[in-house]
Amino acid sequence: MRRLYLVRHGLSESNLSTEVNKRKPDNAIELAEVGHTQAEKAGRFLREYIETEHSKEAQRVRMMVSPYTRTRQTADGLEKSIGQMSTVQYDRRECLQLREQSFGLFDGMSPEELMAEYPRELKHYNKHKEFEGEFFAPMPMGESRARVCDRVRSSFGPILRDFQGKDMQPVTDMIVVSHGVTIRCFIREFLHLPWEWCEAEPNPNNCSVILIEGEENRGWELKYIFNGFDHPTGTRHAIQEHREEGHV
């Protein structure tokens, strides 16, 4: 049995306001203060879950992390508990394919600003939305969610190889620390779900834990095992929530 845990980063600066995206590129966005606490709480949950539910099976734990600042900081918080597991081998690596969807030139801009600065590009994007195909809509100097699915899929080879343990002790528990849209795309690709599922599925909460458990060629099961943390009351308005889930 192999276990793949998908963890969304903690509450970030841009989760509170898109204004920060006008000043910083997405890779440099940091966790909000409470995001560090959320990561530590999720780490304690993961340690207890692995030790309690799979104490006899868990032998090697690996963390695969998006290289963005907020996911690195989340991994640091998780590691305070995961790294203290004396009964297993543990290590951590970064995976470029697990980064968040890029909004390109649309990043951090209001609908009014988009209409004023990029009317042609926005018209092309909205053409997809009119036919319920926003999943395929590209952003200028950015990505569509379909493109995110393409690159996320390329991370499966190394993950499945680590599970098989070619020339090393097999990984039994893989912790993937990534982003809301990327996690949805990861699940879609790993479980061969229709693209419409990715569009209908909301982002997981910050520091939530989703488990994919099973064996290659024998089937995998999806479980939501830790709900994580919703945004603080009053900080998440409709436009911001829409943006975080990958929509313009």
Image (cartoon, helix red, strand yellow):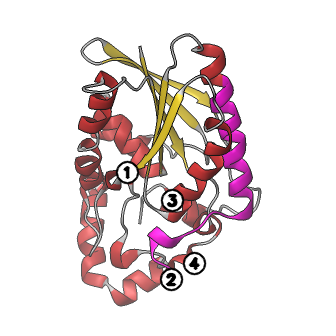
Q: CA distance from mark 2 to mark 4?
A: 5 Å
The residue sitting at 54% across, 47% down in the picture is 8
Mark 3 and 4 residues: CB-CB less than 8 Å, in contact?
no
The residue sitting at 59% across, 58% down in the picture is 73
Check disc 1 and report the residue beneath it: 98
Residue 155 badge = none
Q: Secondary structure at mark 3?
A: helix
Q: Residue 129's image quarter?
A: bottom left
Q: CA distance from mark 1 to mark 3?
A: 16 Å
Amino acid identity at mark 2 = Lys
Q: Nearer the viewer, residue 168 or 11?
A: 168
Q: Nearer the viewer, mark 1 or mark 2?
A: 1
Is 32 covered by the magenta stretch?
yes
Q: Residue furthest bottom?
A: 116
Above or below, 98 relative to 6: below
Check disc 3 and report the residue beneath it: 244
Residue 203: image location, x then y, percent: 51, 46
Residues drawn in magenta: 24-48
Check disc 4 and report the residue beneath it: 20
Check disc 2 and report the residue beneath it: 22
Crowd tier of the residue under label 2, counting other residues whose Cα lies within 10 Å: few below 14, some 14–19, many 20 or above: few
Q: Nearer the viewer, mark 2 or mark 3?
A: 2
Q: Secondary structure at mark 2?
A: helix
Mark 2 and 4 residues: CB-CB less than 8 Å, in contact?
yes
Above or below, 226 relative to 69: above
Residue 13 located left or right of residue 203: right
